[in-house]
Image (tube, rainbow, N blue to C red):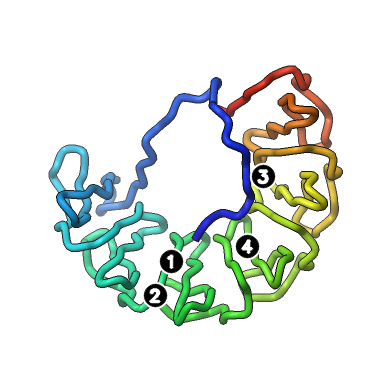
Amino acid sequence: MKRRILFKSIALILIIGVFSLTTCKNSSEKTILIPVRKGLTWGYVSPNSEKKIPYNFDDAGEFSEGLARVKKNGEYGFINESGEVVIAFEFNSSGSFSEGLANAMKNYKDVYINKSGEVVIPSGFNYAGEFSEGLAVVRKGKKYGYISKSGDVVIPFEYDDAGGFSEGLAIVVKDNKYGFINESGEVVIPFEYDNAWGFSEGFAAVEAGNKWGLIDKRGNTVIKFIYDEVGFY
């Protein structure tokens, strides 16, 4: 499942690329389990090779909230940190768990499941994103809105594109312009940008007139729009 905000391809000049690792608890210690491929199959190893999960899968994702998405015989399920299958291989595709729920596709319909593999929010959407700060982006027809964990629509389907919430604000798009809304659906930063990244540590990178700058959560410019490329720590 793809995140649907369509960012332009930009080179990062302020960021050091970090290989993303997901940690999981083993008793009181933390063990890193990294998805790796050997030949045509996937498994998991720890950096010191003290712990591993055999190469039994056609695809494997990182651990999130104690579970990892894996693929076998064309279907997706979830394993725990011991490599045990805890959610059966019965999904056409799946995202990772976030805030206790995972977006998945069952019988080619988008749904949300809990950690027991039960469908808790049934199909009714043309796209379903991961939960972030209690809300998830969903699409009906050609418009995007947001639902709560109970499946209730809390922000109407009125946007051409939308991203997940970060630090209380989410990027939304109308008429090819980017703005930000809060969790009540109120427009906090107007639709006046050509591109945008979500907020991180109080700031967001936005583009206007083919130049990039930084704004704060009130929409004030904190770094002028003079850069061709910009990135985040």
Taking the spot 21% from the left edge, 44% from the top edge, the residue there is 46
Label number found at residue 167:
3
**Amino acid at dot 4:** Ala
- Please state which of the two labelled residues, at mark 1 or mark 3, is closer to the viewer: 1
Examine the image and state in which quarter residue 30 appears: top left
Give me the C-alpha separation between circle 1 and circle 3: 25 Å
Which of the two labelled residues, at mark 1 and mark 3, occupies the earlier sequence position? 1
**Amino acid at dot 2:** Phe
Numbered disc 2: secondary structure: strand
Report if the CB atoms under discs 2 and 1 are less than 8 Å apart: yes
Q: Which quarter of the rendering shows the C terminus? A: top right
Residue 210 in the image, given as x and y percentages of width and height: 74, 27
Vertical relation: 184 (above or below) 34: below
Which of the two labelled residues, at mark 2 and mark 4, occupies the earlier sequence position? 2
Which of the two labelled residues, at mark 1 and mark 4, occupies the earlier sequence position? 1
Taking the spot 71% from the left edge, 26% from the top edge, the residue there is 212
Give me the C-alpha separation between circle 2 and circle 1: 7 Å
Label number found at residue 94:
1
Q: Nearer the viewer, residue 203 or 30?
A: 203
Residue 152 in the image, given as x and y percentages of width and height: 70, 75
Q: Residue under circle 2?
A: 91
Q: Residue under circle 4?
A: 136
**Amino acid at dot 3:** Glu
Taking the spot 47% from the left edge, 73% from the top edge, the residue there is 105
Dot 3: within a 10 Å radius of its alpha carbon, few (fewer than 14), some, or many (20 or more) residues?
A: some
**Amino acid at dot 1:** Ser
Taking the spot 59% from the left edge, 67% from the top edge, the residue there is 127
Dot 1: within a 10 Å radius of its alpha carbon, few (fewer than 14), some, or many (20 or more) residues?
A: many
Numbered disc 3: secondary structure: loop
Examine the image and state in which quarter residue 13 appears: top right
Residue 129 in the image, given as x and y percentages of width and height: 57, 62
Dot 4: within a 10 Å radius of its alpha carbon, few (fewer than 14), some, or many (20 or more) residues?
A: many
